[in-house]
Image (spheres, rainbow, N blue to C red):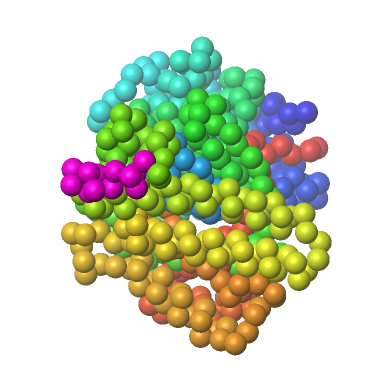
Amino acid sequence: MDYSIRMTAQELLRRLDSPASETALSLFYKDPERSRQRAKALVRGLAEHVSDGETVRLFSAPGRTELGGNHTDHNRGRVLAASIQLDILAAVSPRKDKKVFFRSSGFDDVELDLSDLGRKSEEEGSTRALIRGVAAAFATRGIETGGFTGNAESLVLPGSGLSSSAAVEVLIASIFDRLFGGGRQRSLEIAKIGQWAENEYFGKPSGLMDQAACASGGAVAIDLKDIENPKVKVVPFNPEAAGFALCVVDTRGSHAGLTPDYAAIPDEMKAVAGFFGKTVLRETSLRAVLEHCAELRAGLGDRAVLRALHFFAENDRVPLMTRALEALNAEKDRGAKGKIMDRFLNLVNQSGSSSCMLLQNIYAAGKPREQGISLALALTRIFLETQTAGQTLNGACHGACRVHGGGFAGTIQAYIPLESLPAYTENMETVFGRGALTPLAIRPVGAAEIELPA
């Protein structure tokens, strides 16, 4: 049942104050009380901009963390990702016209008219482009959209590799779907809508990993071989239950001027595929690349060959990681679970090494003095070796770390034994600044409306 279709701001606030709301909020958040206060503030803020008696609804879309499959999605590879507890929460009221008014704390207000769904070059890279693009994607599917007034707050750190843009896309898509489309779109279709808006209107080439993880919820293994019908498998994963804190460390490097570095990765991979008359690397094979290695390096350069080798290794690694998580969920014996977690973390470390040595997205060649990711990875490995020397914690590996997301600047991902997290946090924040480390929790619910019982 959709509890909130005709709910006013006053009724929504009353339900948020009800003890019954804790059950609904706990599906989305580890701290329901804090989230209750956050939701109430957003509803009150929205109520100042809509008429009394207007419908008000709550929507949430999580950020995501990449668990495996670094830079494989744009060549139709396999990825492993998970939605996280950091989200965009929005109080929304539908309008009778085609205008959208969207406010998000810390960002400029967005106003646009959906009567015009044409692509605007001057809007590229903006939230306005994402909203217009999502509405246009619905229109191409023959689904009517309408205007709304929204008041939002994002906890998805921009520039952190946690996919703040994908979270916005699937949030807006969920709003349009629930307000005007009857709530008929499955999470994968919501993800495709968001990706299309990002590619076509926002102006950023991307695969489907970010949007699929944000839309689906939980950890998801995604196989993009058939780009029109990718395979998505939910794989429950709770690192804390295995004795580890999953976290990201923001090295606070600048992303300015890095667009050519990011673009070069898919371009070089696709150039290798093009040598064989194919579009993407998924259509060829490691064997073919090895057999023609001399010709490839002569024509495309060594780095292109190395990046192709990374793709094949990483693409084969994702199913191994997925099977390890499935085995972890099925196993009851604590000692056996520790060995399985050890296997998974070793694969995480292999992924990180491949990104360093083959993919080479640890630092930008044009900025050799700025190597925050390399430094964070080195410090993490030294920390884990020092803190756990001669020990085996929880029957599992000492920990793991890898580059997170696009690379070159930004964040690393680390699995740290729970008892070592305070010391690791102090270590990282001494170097990279207060608040550089963010613990992550995998959220089981993707982009959705938060429905509150009476």
Left or right relative to 445: residue 416: left
| x and y percentages locating residue 24 in the rendered image | 74, 45
Left or right relative to 29: residue 289: left
Left or right relative to 36: residue 82: left
Furthest-front residue in this view? 291
Question: Measuring 66% from the left and 54% from the top, which residue is drawn there?
Answer: 325
Any part of residue 48 in sight: no
Give the quadrant of residue 288.
top left
Between 82 and 168, the one lying in front of the other is 82
Between 423 and 116, the one lying in front of the other is 423
| x and y percentages locating residue 354 in the rendered image | 41, 59
Left or right relative to 196: residue 306: left
Write down the region rendered in magenta: 288-300
Between 257 and 279, the one lying in front of the other is 279
| x and y percentages locating residue 202 in the rendered image | 34, 34
Instruction: Confirm whether the magenta stretch covers residue 297.
Output: yes
Give the quadrant of residue 1.
top right
